Image (cartoon, rainbow, N blue to C red):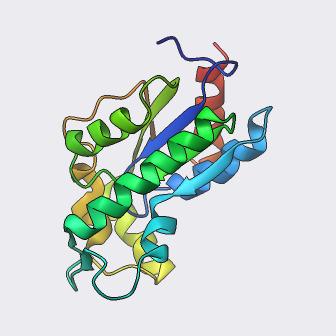
Amino acid sequence: MTVDVVTTQVIVLNGGSSSGKSGISRCLQAVLPEPWLALSVDTLVDAMPPVNSGIEFASDGGVHVGEGFRTMEAAWMAGVAAMARAGARIIIDDVFLGGAASQQRWQKALDGLYVLWVGVRCDSEVAAGREIARGDRARGMAASQAELAHQDVHYDLEVDTTRTESMACARTIAAYLDR
């Protein structure tokens, strides 16, 4: 599908923890000509019950996902896709812990919609520094996800926040949409 600002309904930003996806989402909302909703997988995780949610965060930064989480994730994805089908423009901020398999779950949910797939890369050491500065993530999460999230994932566009600010990345994405 050809991607442009007129027809794109969903922008999927994928990258590891602390790679800069949330900042890019906010900047995209500021630079894109139409209103866009920014939805993050963190919102889904925060909405899950504190016990028996099917997702566990290890002290070394590892994330383990079970069937209970996958069930809720599928419902969340279907809901996000329904909003896009109803006319909302959506920016999704996600971490594809399963690489290509995670992308395939989104592709299934977003079938028939015009989607821009954006890889958000960041050097693992820089992301680890951001992780420490944030103080709300287990140490090791950013480094372990920096490459894992991109394994066998196919993108229309990639940006790198290692040395590029969120606004510059957002403008790159907006320019891609406007071509």
Residue 137 sits above or below residue 13 on the image? below
Q: Residue at x 29, y 55 (%)?
A: 146
Image side of residue 104 versus residue 10, left or right = left
Q: Position of residue 111 (x, y in %)?
A: 41, 27
Q: Position of residue 167 (x, y in %)?
A: 66, 45
Q: Residue at x 48, y 76 (%)?
A: 46
Q: Position of residue 10 (x, y in %)?
A: 56, 34
Image side of residue 155 versus residue 37, left or right = left
Between 153 and 159, the one lying in front of the other is 153
Residue 143 visible in the displayed image: yes
Residue 89 sits above or below residue 102 on the image? above
Residue 5 sits above or below residue 56 on the image? above
Residue 2 sits above or below residue 165 on the image? above
Q: Quadrant of the C terminus?
A: top right
Q: Position of residue 87 (x, y in %)?
A: 69, 34
Q: Residue at x 32, y 66 (%)?
A: 142
Residue 161 visible in the displayed image: no
Q: Residue at x 22, y 86 (%)?
A: 59
